[in-house]
Image (cartoon, rainbow, N blue to C red):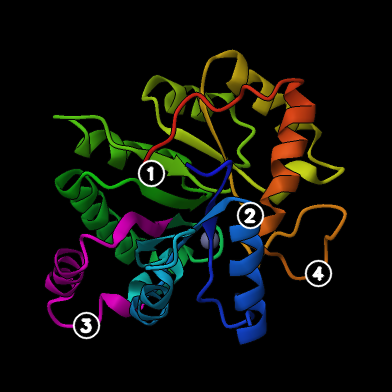
Amino acid sequence: MSLYFDFHCHLADEQYTTEDLSQILSICQQENITICSMSTNFEDFKLNLEYSNHPNVLIGFGIHPYEAHKIKQMPNWEEKIQKTIEQYKNLIKFIGEVGLDFYKMKHTYQQQIEVFEYFTYLSSEYNLPLSIHTRSAEKEVCNILIKYQKKKKLKAIFHCYTSTEKDIAKTILENEWYFGFGGVITFKKSTELREILKYIYDNKGNILCETDSPYITPEPYRGKKNYPYFVKIIYENVEKILKTKDFIFSYPI
Ligand SMILES: [Zn+2]
């Protein structure tokens, strides 16, 4: 078992060079960090498959909300998604990155909902945790999750959690879903988010650490490229805010 998990990152991102990738894998192996690498489309997933047999890598398959409208144009898109999961079910450990983004992509909301609902259904069928991106659509995401978890609880991870609305945190707590904290928690301006983190901890919420690398680089490297091994910075920050090492109540995997 690893000491550290980066619960959400993108090894397949085009920003990473071959040198970056071999450095990431060797540092993570040395420092006992498990990398959970998400896919945003079918092409990403193919690249992630190449890393899936590395001892420190777990991979996810999903279609990012920014890509949902493109997938919806494919004939038999549902069948294509389901076949991919069926074919690689021994390798796929997460469904992600999936979700709803009504902030940047309001015009594709209908396609996003259909694609996200389908992945939520597959998450319950295959008992796989969902790694969820959501922006300005937290309530809609919660409603879809509740709709599909009638028989058993879904393992839903709210990746890059930044909502400061207490009602959203309460719904996630009630359903025993997961909060993924990343680089934003280290930013100077995130005072309110740090208060929410304390509230979640006090209410025995499931707290996970992640980087979303190569994006959302934590302080003091903000503005530069992000790497999965920077997750140690996130662990240190969360520990400092909560004044304890004992903040992870359970893992979704
Ligand atoms: Zn991501």
The residue nearer to you, when weighing 237 against 5, is 5
Residue 100 in magenta stretch: no
- Identify the magenta region: 70-99
Residue 202: percent from left, percent from top: 61, 14
Q: Measure the alpha-carbon separation of dots 4 and 3.
A: 36 Å
Query: Residue flagged by tag 3: what amino acid is it?
Result: Met
Dot 3 or dot 2: first in sequence order is 3
Q: Measure the alpha-carbon separation of dots 4 and 2.
A: 13 Å
The residue nearer to you, when weighing 173 against 94, is 94
**Tag 3 residue:** 74
The residue nearer to you, when weighing 233 against 171, is 233
Tell me the quarter of the picture where residue 104 sits: bottom right
Q: Measure the alpha-carbon separation of dots 3 and 2.
A: 31 Å
**Tag 1 residue:** 141
Dot 1 falls on a residue whose secondary structure is: helix
Image mark for residue 211: 2
Dot 4 falls on a residue whose secondary structure is: loop
